[in-house]
Image (cartoon, rainbow, N blue to C red):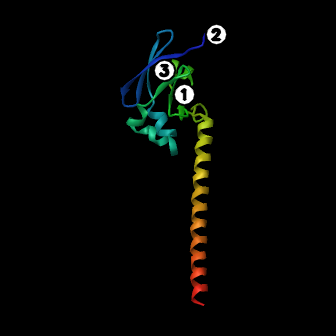
Amino acid sequence: MKIITVNKAEYLGDFKLKITFDDQNTREINFAPVLRLYATGDYAKYKKEKYFKEFRIESNNIVWGSDWDLIFPIEELYAGKINVSLNQTKMKKGSMLKSIQNKLARLKSEELESVERFLKTMSKQENTASSVS
């Protein structure tokens, strides 16, 4: 079985790409339905044309984001249609996990800063109270 790879991708407008494969077959694919349904949270930015247009070809596929935020099965791209079932839509799991870990780290950091501010305030109030006595 021959492995299909993406050679070239061109933005056509309205979230559509013209994709050329290594066997010179081309497909025009509309990504708008998939983005409307599944691009949420950190991935919602790809609903904006500015970010959607920042795709690139890496590892013989089309990807978005530095951590492959969005990636779709080459077989579906080659068939000319993205399967919009959630189970078939491919978002890099590692990227999703990293995003969650980053959010947790930010939350922990914010909580620690809040606790530190509280402790400093309490310490200042204690020092002020002891100097008045």
| The N terminus lies in quadrant | top right
Q: Position of residue 100 (x, y in %)?
A: 60, 46
Q: Label 1: which residue?
A: 72
| The C terminus lies in quadrant | bottom right
Residue at 48% x, 20% y is 80
The alpha-carbon separation of the residues under discs 2 and 1 comes to 20 Å
Give whichever of discs 2 and 3 has the lower sequence position. 2
Q: Position of residue 70 (x, y in %)?
A: 53, 33
- The secondary element bearing badge 1 is classed as loop
In the picture provided, is 27 more to the left or to the right than 105? Answer: left
Q: Label 3: which residue?
A: 80
Location of residue 98 with respect to 133 vertically, above or below:
above
Give whichever of discs 2 and 1 has the lower sequence position. 2
Camera sees residue 40: no
Location of residue 5 with respect to 70 vertically, above or below:
above
Query: What crowding class fits label 1: few (fewer than 14 Cα within 10 Å), some (14-19), or many (20 or more)?
Result: some
Query: What crowding class fits label 2: few (fewer than 14 Cα within 10 Å), some (14-19), or many (20 or more)?
Result: few
Tag 2: residue type? Met
Query: What crowding class fits label 3: few (fewer than 14 Cα within 10 Å), some (14-19), or many (20 or more)?
Result: some
- The secondary element bearing badge 2 is classed as loop
For this orientation, the residue located farthest to the front is 131
Camera sees residue 110: yes
Name the quadrant containing residue 69: top right
